[in-house]
Amino acid sequence: MTRPKNVLVVATIAMVSLVVVLLVAGTLYNQLALHKLRSLAHAPGEIYRVDGYDVHMFCTGEGSPTVMLDTGLGDDFTTWVKVQPELSRVTRVCSFDRSGFGSSAMTPRPHDADTLAAQLHDLVRVAGIDTPFVLVGHSISGLYLRAYAKRYVGELAALVFIDAATPLQDDRVPRSLVAIQESQRAGMPWQKLLMTIGWYRLQGICSSVPAGFEAYSAVIQANNCDPTQFDALEAELDAVRQSGEETLKVGPFPHLPVLILSRDPTSMPSNWPPEVARANSLVWNQMQEESKDLSPISRRIIAKGSDHYIHVDRPDLVNREVTGLVEALRRGEVSYSRAEPTIEE
């Protein structure tokens, strides 16, 4: 009478053991692949020791003011591949990886706007970047730009927001969109697990390189499917409300030029329900317009035909406008005015 029970126990143990072996094998497979890819990839630039942690920064070109490029959530310096080479023809340009992304080490400190702004300030000091400089930020880094201006406005020549986040925007966007975002956040531990055990790599996801980014193929593939970068992603997302509260009352800055480049309101994300995308577009456009209040020396342009990644979809516009800003700063005559209407180009 006990034999069937014993058989079931043995079968269960065997199945669990097989699952454990497969999980361990998958994890080793992913780690060995990452190790090999990193040995072949060489991210350009330098590693700086900032407050005890490694931070990667890549600088090109010569001249002043320097243009510092801060990325959106989950991105590294490679996101600027269509911008940095062109701007480097005009002045010195530096892109960097925030804590935990790309080739920069993950710090145990909070990843709120004030903390990340302080880390950038330390990087600027350690790397010997001349001030004042132009600080450019995409998406979530719009909050970090505000925090930097709040604490170190004397180091800034201008701010450039590229379809940038605004403080506490989740309180204003459609609740249905917030629900989608919360669902995505809840699924991140599962995604991290699948990445860790090599499932994504087996599916070929880790080897994909977006069109136009081939120059950085080796670097992108070396960082793809690194589960540790989820730690930085989650840390910034979990601090986004604190970041919003820290930057809600920043400004206005009476002498700081501000350039705002916004997505085309008619460009709808394909992974959102149409009604959610339309409702969010109206609110987003209003929040972008309100960003002009950061300075009386402000200018806003809507990038016709572009989605959220304007520096990828419309690098021509980014390169032209930032170049024009740099040249105007050199002349000492930035002609922006908040009173001028927003234009579409």
Image (cartoon, helix red, strand yellow):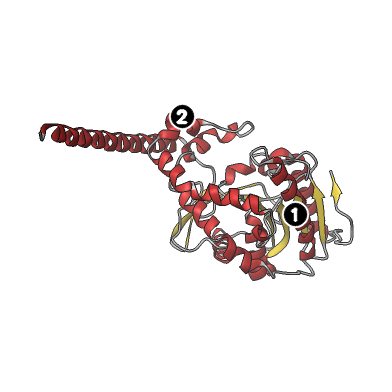
x, y percent for residue 9 = 18, 37
Residue drawn at x 76%, y 65% is: 294
Residue 166 vs residue 68, the one in the foreground = 166
Identify residue for label 1.
283
Would residue 151 be visible to someone looking at this image? yes
x, y percent for residue 35 = 39, 38
Left/right placement of residue 247 relative to residue 1 reads right
What amino acid type should be assigned to the residue bearing mark 1? Answer: Val
What amino acid type should be assigned to the residue bearing mark 2? Answer: Gln
Extreme residue toward the right, this view: 340
Residue drawn at x 17%, y 34% is: 10
Front label number (1 vs 2): 1
x, y percent for residue 42 = 49, 39
Identify residue for label 2.
203
x, y percent for residue 345 = 84, 43
Residue drawn at x 85%, y 58% is: 336
Look at the picture and state if 116 lies above or below 83: below
Residue 80 vs residue 260, the one in the foreground = 260
Question: CA separation, marks 1 and 2?
Answer: 37 Å
